[in-house]
Amino acid sequence: MLDATQALTVLAELDPGPTPRALLEHRLAEISDDLAGNRLFRPGELPDTHFMRFAIIDDPRGELPSMLAWETNHDGRAADYLAAVARAAPSIETVFECCAGYPSRGILDLDDWVAWMMARSYPAGAFYIAYRGVPRSMILNDRLVHEAIRDMIDHDRAVLCDLPRCEIQRQICARVAERHPDLELSPTGDEEARWLIGKILALLALVVVLPFALVLALPWYLVLRRKESTDISTAYIRPVAIDPAVRDAEDRATQNQLTHVVDIKPGRFRFATLWLVLKAIDITAQVYSVRGDLGGITTIHFARWVILRDRRARQPGVRARHRLLFFSNYDGSWESYLGEFIDRAAYGLTAVWSNTVGFPATEHLVCRGARDEEAFKQWTREHQIMTQVFWTGAPGSTVQNIRDDVFIRQQLDRGLADHELTAWLRKL
Amino acid sequence: MSVPQAADLDDIQGLIYTGWNDHPYAGFVFATLGGDARASRAWLKALQPAISSVTHRRAKAPGRIQVAISRWGLTALGVPDDVIEMLAPEAHAGMAARRRTLGDTDPAGWQLGGSAGRLDVLVMVYAHDPACRARRLAEQRDSLVAAGATVRSEELGWPQGPREHFGFADGLSQPYLPGLHAEPRRGEDPIAAGEILLGYPNAYDQHPITPIWNDVDLGRNGTYLVFRKLAQDVAAFWGWIAGHARKLANGDATLAAQLTDLIGAKLMGRWRSGAPLALTPDIDDPAYATPDRVNAFKYLDYDPAGLRCPIASHVRRANPRDARGGSARDSETVVNRHRILRRGRSFGAPLPYETAITGRDDGVSRGLYFVCLQSSIARGFEFIQQSWLANPGFAGLHVEPDPIVGNPAGACHVTIPAEPVRLRLANVPTVVTNLGGEYFFLPSLAAIARIAAGP
């Protein structure tokens, strides 16, 4: 599964003081202003990348160093990907050289550079992919195939309508192949077996873990209920003021981004609970929610949570401030995205974010919380941060568009039963 | 209290209960208040007793008056900033600032709001006859001017009929508010009072944030009002459809006429009579346009793939009912969190259907004063406009915004599902253009009295 799409999250500290940060911000603004034509770094040169973003993470309390976050969703292993990035898009250096401790020879010393980046890459606590096993090259190819089919039907509809269904399919396939010899039309192997093995392994793991979990469940639950009764949630009597730059960077096109950073509630209990919840979501996303549907939400391309540990030296009286980062690449507006969260996935979100500060009051880990619609939206706004650069590899396509395109190409040159043909033709 | 009680009906402006359809003549006065907050408050105080509450709806006095105030108007009336900041963020930002969210034209060219002048107050007049409307409007204008205000615009509605300018029966699907409305008609969904009125629990069983001034809840029994002036190009709409119908009919005039009617219905999502396509897919059968049948339908039962009512059609997007994804029940729960009360009126003389299908315009300015009410503009009007209507990827569509109201740049595609293969029409013209508008707060009578009393 190493060829599958992976999550890379590089978090690099900036040198203290306003100058390094201002320089970085300036460069990111220049890149964002003209993603395809700027002089510094053009994300379109990145190989096999679905989505990527740069965001500067500041600490509102000024205690923790500012960091540059680079989030990519790419095909293939991280180290191989970074080496390919260094070859195809070496100008990415203009961004990372603003960070603390950047290697003096930079990207020229490839191994050293990859090692520097890998040392700053954080594993995702949970990572969701809407179209697992679909590389970017396939997405782009299949979109062109679908477009070619649609143009052909527009043109030849009158002729096609008089033919039997299987003949329509054959004609479409033949004509598209003739007019677009460059496109890949053959059906690729179905992935079902892969998920089946994963599901069986996950079930086995569950059977092994379950007895231990049951023993620990009661004391854990009692502590949780006590904490829930004393935790402080933020009361919003007026709407949170939204940074105009954040608002201006969202609701842009078909695909949108959200970057969110919040402190994890202090203490080991919440940290461990959060880790477990993320692990459960991660496993679910890998073996169960593999068909573009995360608990009823069909509009998320890629999303990840990353735990960012406080790496400052321990001092007496100073509590560690671990943070939880959330990066999401979704379809549609902020309002509809948050609405889907609340309407369809409130349990899961509450289980995650109830372990972070200020979250609306919860019960039994998963109840209430995100269901307090307005408070949840205000809380999200409060901790949402600016995404300085957001780039997408297949702009204009929704999750469902991508999955339809792949489906249409997979069935194009394949013998289908009557009801399958009807379903296929309705998708075109 | 989770629903309004009898006493609240004296406090709630009548527009929330009714569109005043028994008063066919509507007029709207928009004004910028003067710099003297005291004079503006005196104007509001004098006007307050004339505003019709829900219980006043049976009063004998001719004409009905409703008043809405924008966030700029509240400032001009001397309401402190920290109170105004408690308004919903969209109402606080104003419609022009939400241009990108709404996919609107540049407010610099608007006839109403935007560069055409700040809109502080909106006084709505509803009357039985044109003379009464003229009298009432003149009174309103004079008293505003006397208080130092500048009248920006006076908009006159065309006498209210059952159909909008494209010729379709309009305002058919409205939510039902227990406690406010009597029994629902068949197919009307009950929604939580707090979805429309501030001060009551909403669909999430929460009280929305509300502006509070020295312990007085200004929001209670009030709502937010969206006003938009939408131009409708009726000749472009029917002319374009008739052109495609002629091509498809291959010279058969009778078939072309039928196809014109059918494609129009497929784009709108209902027949011109209002009969739903999901119930009568082939002909406009008025038997399905009666009040007890016109809303008694769902999509998943008869039409999951949109073969009857296209998924891209206006009506199916604006209220997807049970077909928004997941189970029917999940979908209806979610959809009912995005309901609005519509109180629109047409303006301009209608263009006869026979003229419209020739594609020749008569140069008359016509359209819709779109008016809607909701406790959250972001979750109500803006959500429907942005995430359902204008969204090119709505419900799995491939780059197809709403052909009626989501196509300001023109030239979008629209797919009409059919067997064995769909019909896709290209280059849909722009038929609805926003000429401007504003977000207003529609306060209760008590809140108006409190605002008029001053700090």
Image (tube, rainbow, N blue to C red):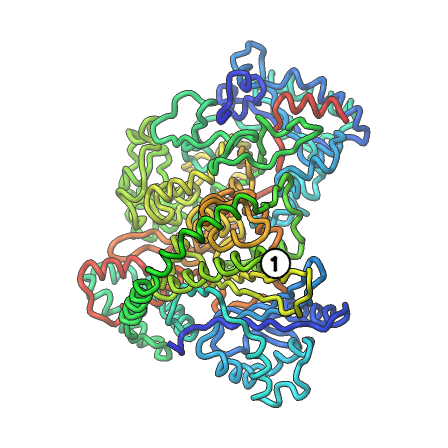
Q: How many marks?
A: 1
Decide: is A363 above or below A205: above
Q: Which residue is situated farthest in the right direction here?
A: B36
Q: Where is residue A408 drawn, in percent x and y?
A: 31, 66
* Percent coordinates x, y for residue A299 in the rendering: 44, 57
Q: Looking at the image, which is closer to me, A77 or A172?
A: A77
* Residue B435 in view (yes/no): yes
Judged left or right of residue B333, residue A232 is right
Q: What is the chain identity of the residue bearing mark 1?
A: A
> Observer-nearest residue: A271 or A163?
A271
Q: Residue at x 51, y 43 (%)?
A: A373
Return the x and y of residue A167 as percentages of the image width and height.
20, 66
- The quarter in which the N terminus of chain A is drawn is bottom left
Quadrant in which the C terminus of chain A is drawn: bottom left
Front one among B2 and B156: B2
Mark 1 is surrounded, within 10 Å at the Cα level, by few (under 14), some (14 to 19) or many (20 or more) other residues, namely some
Residue A187 lies in quadrant? bottom left
Residue ID at (23%, 65%): A168
- Helix, strand or loop at mark 1: loop
Q: For this view, does B220 lie left or right of residue B286?
A: right
Residue lying furthest bottom: A109
**Is the residue A404 above or below the residue A343 in the image?**
below
Amino acid carrying mark 1 in the image: Ala
Front one among A19 and B243: A19
Q: Is residue B276 left or right of residue A370?
A: left
Read off the residue under disc 1.
Answer: A249
Q: Is residue A154 visible?
A: no
Residue B129: image x %, image y %? 55, 17
Residue A407 placement: quadrant: bottom left
